[in-house]
């Protein structure tokens, strides 16, 4: 779609609610859900916010031929990838998720490796008219515990991401149980007394965030527990 400012804006149908953790499963759920949505909207193409679990992201990042195949399969279905969902590492569709979806977090090398795999895949899937790509990710870590050592580890991972992610941005999604809970917290980074902030966004490209937006009529419901969450953990509120 064309933004009022003259820029092209890509909207995407998010696939992370559909369980699929290998390429065959991804293609099957696209046929089941995304293709009918495209037809219903008469959209050609339909943008996707594609979720790739860590194993399939690693396989695609390591195999250019596999990435070409995925792009060809998307094109044949009238689909394009405009962003990748990199928040859930795996098993997002489990009956109860809670804090498990926050692991591995940004204090670990696994989270950095996963996000870099997604950035490599996205570089070969982006539409030609997209100036940059985005990978949504978690708000650093679960809210507690959090100490100076964890903050330093997260800063090192984010510094490495900034150096190696190319034209892709990581969009950190604030959450009530995450280390970054609000947009203001995202702008300020994670401050440590006497140390520079651990900022969850590449500074040379500006701030990036992934936000959930609700219509005015549905906004009050945002305070109710999500269906997958169960009761709120200690120190958190929905």
Image (cartoon, rainbow, N blue to C red):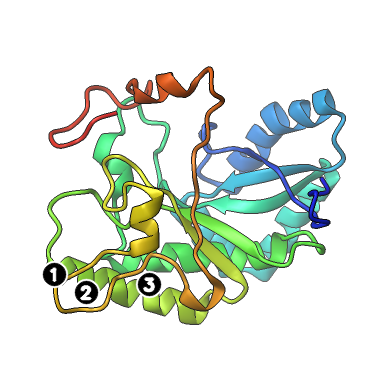
For the residues labelled 1 and 2, say whether their Cβ atoms are less than 8 Å apart: yes
Q: Earlier in the sequence, mark 2 or mark 3?
A: 2
For the residues labelled 2 and 3, say whether their Cβ atoms are less than 8 Å apart: no
Q: Residue at x 52, y 78 (%)?
A: 204
Task: Give coordinates of residue 127: x percent, y percent.
Answer: 78, 59
Q: Relative to residue 148, is residue 179 drawn left or right?
A: right
User: Label 1 belongs to which residue?
Assistant: 148
- Helix, strand or loop at disc 2? helix
Q: Residue at x 33, y 43 (%)?
A: 101
Task: Give coordinates of residue 172: x percent, y percent.
Answer: 43, 55
Give the answer, above or below, for where 27 lies relative to 152.
above
Q: Residue at x 71, y 33 (%)?
A: 34
**Image quarter (top left, top right, bottom left or bottom right) of the N terminus:** top right
Q: Is residue 123 visible?
A: yes
Q: CA distance from mark 2 to mark 3?
A: 10 Å
Which one is in front, 141 or 125?
141
**Image quarter (top left, top right, bottom left or bottom right) of the C terminus:** top left
For label 2, the crowd category at 10 Å Cα-Cα, with few meaning under 14, some 14 to 19 and many 20 or more, is: some
What mark, if any, has residue 158 been given in the picture?
Answer: 3
Task: Give coordinates of residue 109: x percent, y percent.
Answer: 31, 69
Q: Earlier in the sequence, mark 3 or mark 1?
A: 1
Q: Quadrant of residue 37?
A: top right
What mark, if any, has residue 152 been given in the picture?
Answer: 2
What mark, if any, has residue 199 been given in the picture?
Answer: none
Q: CA distance from mark 3 to mark 1?
A: 15 Å
């Amino acid at each position: 779609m064309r933004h009022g400012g003259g820029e092209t804006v890509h909207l995407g149908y998010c696939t992370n609610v559909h369980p699929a953790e290998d390429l065959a499963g991804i293609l099957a759920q696209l046929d089941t859900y995304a293709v009918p949505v495209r037809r219903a909207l008469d959209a050609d193409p339909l943008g996707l916010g594609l979720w790739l679990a860590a194993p399939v992201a690693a396989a695609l990042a390591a195999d250019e031929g596999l990435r070409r195949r995925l792009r060809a399969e998307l094109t044949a279905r009238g689909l394009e990838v405009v962003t990748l969902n990199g928040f859930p590492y795996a098993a997002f569709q489990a009956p109860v998720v809670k804090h498990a979806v926050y692991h591995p977090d940004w204090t670990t090398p696994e989270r950095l490796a996963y996000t870099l795999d997604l950035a490599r895949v996205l570089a070969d899937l982006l539409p030609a008219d997209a100036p940059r790509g985005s990978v949504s990710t978690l708000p650093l870590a679960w809210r507690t515990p959090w100490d100076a050592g964890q903050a330093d580890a997260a800063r090192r991972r984010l510094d490495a991401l900034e150096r190696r992610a190319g034209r892709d941005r990581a969009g950190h999604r604030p959450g009530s149980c995450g280390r970054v809970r609000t947009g203001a917290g995202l702008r300020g980074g994670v401050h440590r007394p006497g140390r520079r902030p651990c900022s969850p966004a590449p500074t040379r490209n500006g701030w990036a965030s992934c936000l959930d937006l609700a219509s005015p009529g549905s906004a009050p419901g945002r305070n109710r527990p999500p269906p997958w969450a169960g009761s709120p953990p200690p120190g958190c509120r929905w």
